[in-house]
Amino acid sequence: MTLRFDHSPSKLKYLSSFAPKNDNSNLCLQCGLCCNGVIFADVAVRSISKIRILKKLGFQLTTRSRLSQPCAAFDGCRCTIYSQRPGQCKKFDCLLLEKVRSGQATQERAIQIIRKARRLVKTIEQLLEKLGNRAVDLPLRSRFKEVSQEMEASEHVDLEAHFGELTLKMHDLNLLLSEDFYPE
Ligand code: SF4
């Protein structure tokens, strides 16, 4: 099932040029999981003026005025519309960021966790591709759901090993996201 949160992505991505070196925003620049379709399926855009601005900038919103993820404004490490990003993006802080701010985790530890999560995502994307899913514009969970439904609908004996591995990796990722990324 695709997870949808009422609050949404990201306290993201200060442009590297103005991200202070010791600022925790450096963590965001190395992460991106709240903009690339891993943590969220979409972002609510509640302000009418913001909807107008985003449309003017060429962004397509869903019929429920949401910005689908992976976000078209995310360039792989930063938000390209940082000053115009939706309010929900401004408000969101992941648990890992909170842990670093409160001293429960060091920057180094947080970076290790981010790297682990990104490695898992990469492996999952490779497995999805091996299983024939190339819908890179969909959230990760939607892609997993699509593949699961296809596997259930017909016999793909040759792909079962890949699907088994994918299921395990998704489980590992969900665990990691619950422990270190989803806000409490
Ligand atoms: S608008 Fe910017 S901060 Fe919000 S999800 Fe998209 S890339 Fe991330």
Image (spheres, helix red, strand yellow):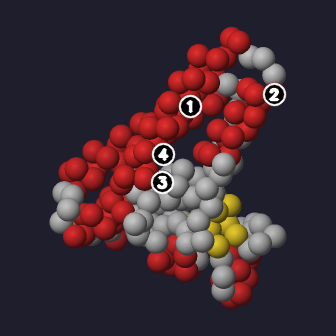
User: Pointer 1: residues within 10 angstroms few (<14), some, or many (20+)?
Assistant: some
Q: 17 above or below 170?
A: below
Residue that extends furthest to the top in the rendered view of this protein:
158
Do callouts 1 and 4 mark residues in contact (Cβ within 8 Å)? no
Which residue matches tag 3? Answer: 33
User: Pointer 2: residues within 10 angstroms few (<14), some, or many (20+)?
Assistant: few
Q: Earlier in the sequence, mark 3 or mark 2?
A: 3
Secondary structure, mark 2, is helix
Residue 55 placement, left or right of 130: right
User: Pointer 4: residues within 10 angstroms few (<14), some, or many (20+)?
Assistant: some
Residue 5 placement, left or right of 23: right
Q: 18 above or below 166?
A: below
Secondary structure, mark 4, is helix
Label drawn at residue 174? 4
Which residue matches tag 1? Answer: 167
Residue 150, image x, y percentages: 77, 30
Q: Earlier in the sequence, mark 3 or mark 4?
A: 3
Q: 25 above or below 53?
A: above
- Disc 3 or disc 1, which is closer to the eye? 1
Do callouts 3 and 1 mark residues in contact (Cβ within 8 Å)? no
Please report the residue visible at 40 percent of the width from the left and 57 percent of the height from the top.
181
Secondary structure, mark 1, is helix
Q: Earlier in the sequence, mark 3 or mark 1?
A: 3
The Cα atoms of the two marked residues, 3 and 4, are separated by 12 Å
Viewer-proximal residue among 152 and 25: 152
Q: Quadrant of the C terminus?
A: bottom left
Residue 124, image x, y percentages: 54, 34
Mark 3: C-beta under 8 Å from nearest atom of ligand 1: no
